[in-house]
């Protein structure tokens, strides 16, 4: 029998410590450019029927795509560069300045490209870098796209993605591996509840601080979760593990914002 490593033992200890904590919001994230580095938030102002402001506001078309910024509609993620097929994206460290709409790309701690995405020349600077760096994955020249108010989410409905940290720990126990919750690209990480409890929230309202979130579906996981979000290594088979263990590939839930308000890290979490 394989003995658990020190990192997994540390996570087991953390699990025991958090079991006594009440349900709460553990962390908040947004992803300014689809497929690139997440941005951790201390708080987020939410409006009914909307997603996290600035979340997936930009995407990178893989070759000439079908996205029309004048008539933006939801398109399958296969139209864009994304971690499911383009894991090399995870080897880039990106920073996005929302005030100037400037994207900075770093590789091994060094800046390799920078451009203001709201300008043609700025987009061109980033596109030229990606054309070379992602050459093996491209169907044509990459194009950075956006549209006012549009979010390039994997689902058509504007929503938040919620992941339960206790479920991550349980998946760690089953796999014998330390798992970064950012593999699941959450907007809201919750803790202090039982593993897998979130899968039973569908059709029920949850309150994160003062904000009501209406959970409407489970999240079916794809091969993007197999990619280490830091190294870009395709080093796990999480959907296969879920199916083999539980008979499905669901991990996390989607919820729409039903009331306005501000969610902060540490806010209480409640179901009604």
Image (cartoon, rainbow, N blue to C red):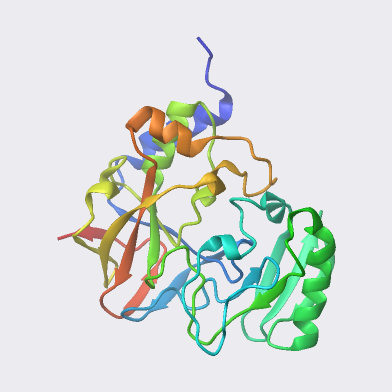
Quarter where residue 110 is shown = bottom right
- Where is residue 184 shown, x and y percent of the image? 49, 51
Q: Quadrant of residue 207?
A: bottom left
Q: Is residue 136 above or below residue 247?
A: below
At a point 56% along the width and 31% down the height, the residue shown is 7
Q: Picture coordinates of residue 240 (x, y %)? A: 47, 34
- Report the side of 186 relative to 92 (left or right): left
Residue at image location 40% in from the left, 68% down from the top: 264
Horizontal side of residue 134 vs 230, given as left or right: right
Residue 16 higher or lower than 75, as above or below = above
User: Considering the image in quadrants, where does the C terminus appear?
Assistant: bottom left
- Count of marks overlaid on the render: 0
Considering depth in this image, is 199 or 207 the residue closer to the camera? 199
Q: Is residue 21 left or right of residue 125?
A: left
Residue 29 is situated, as x and y percent measured from the top left of the image, at 50, 64
Q: Residue furthest left?
A: 272
Taking the spot 39% from the left edge, 66% from the top edge, the residue there is 160
133 left or right, relative to 49:
right
Q: Nearer the viewer, residue 63 or 173?
A: 63
Of all residues shown, which one is farthest toward the top? 1
The location of residue 230, given as percent across then percent down, is: 66, 48
Q: Is residue 252 above or below residue 105?
A: above
Residue at image x 70%, y 56%?
A: 89
Relative to 268, residue 91 above or below: above
């Amino acid at each position: 029998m394989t003995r658990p490593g020190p990192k997994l033992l540390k996570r087991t200890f953390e699990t025991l410590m958090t079991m006594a904590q009440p349900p709460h919001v553990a962390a908040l994230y947004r992803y300014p450019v689809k497929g690139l580095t997440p941005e951790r938030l201390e708080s987020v102002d939410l409006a009914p029927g909307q997603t996290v402001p600035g979340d997936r506001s930009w995407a990178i078309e893989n070759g000439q795509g079908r996205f029309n910024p004048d008539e933006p509609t939801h398109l399958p993620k296969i139209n864009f560069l994304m971690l499911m097929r383009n894991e090399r994206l995870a080897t880039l460290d990106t920073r996005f300045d929302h005030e100037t709409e400037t994207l900075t790309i770093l590789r091994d701690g060094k800046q390799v490209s920078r451009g203001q995405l709201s300008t043609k020349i700025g987009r061109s600077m980033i596109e030229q870098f990606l054309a070379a760096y992602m050459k093996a994955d491209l169907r044509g020249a990459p194009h950075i796209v956006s549209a006012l108010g549009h979010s390039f989410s994997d689902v058509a409905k504007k929503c938040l993605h919620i992941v339960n940290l206790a479920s991550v720990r349980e998946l760690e126990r089953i796999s014998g591996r330390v798992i970064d919750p950012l593999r699941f690209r959450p907007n809201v990480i919750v803790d202090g509840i039982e593993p897998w409890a979130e899968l039973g929230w569908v059709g029920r309202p949850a309150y994160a601080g003062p904000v009501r979130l209406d959970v409407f579906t489970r999240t079916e996981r794809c091969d993007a979760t197999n990619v280490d979000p830091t190294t870009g290594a395709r080093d796990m088979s999480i959907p296969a593990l879920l199916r083999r263990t539980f008979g499905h590939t669901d991990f996390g839930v989607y919820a729409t914002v039903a009331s306005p308000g501000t969610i902060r890290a540490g806010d209480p979490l409640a179901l009604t």
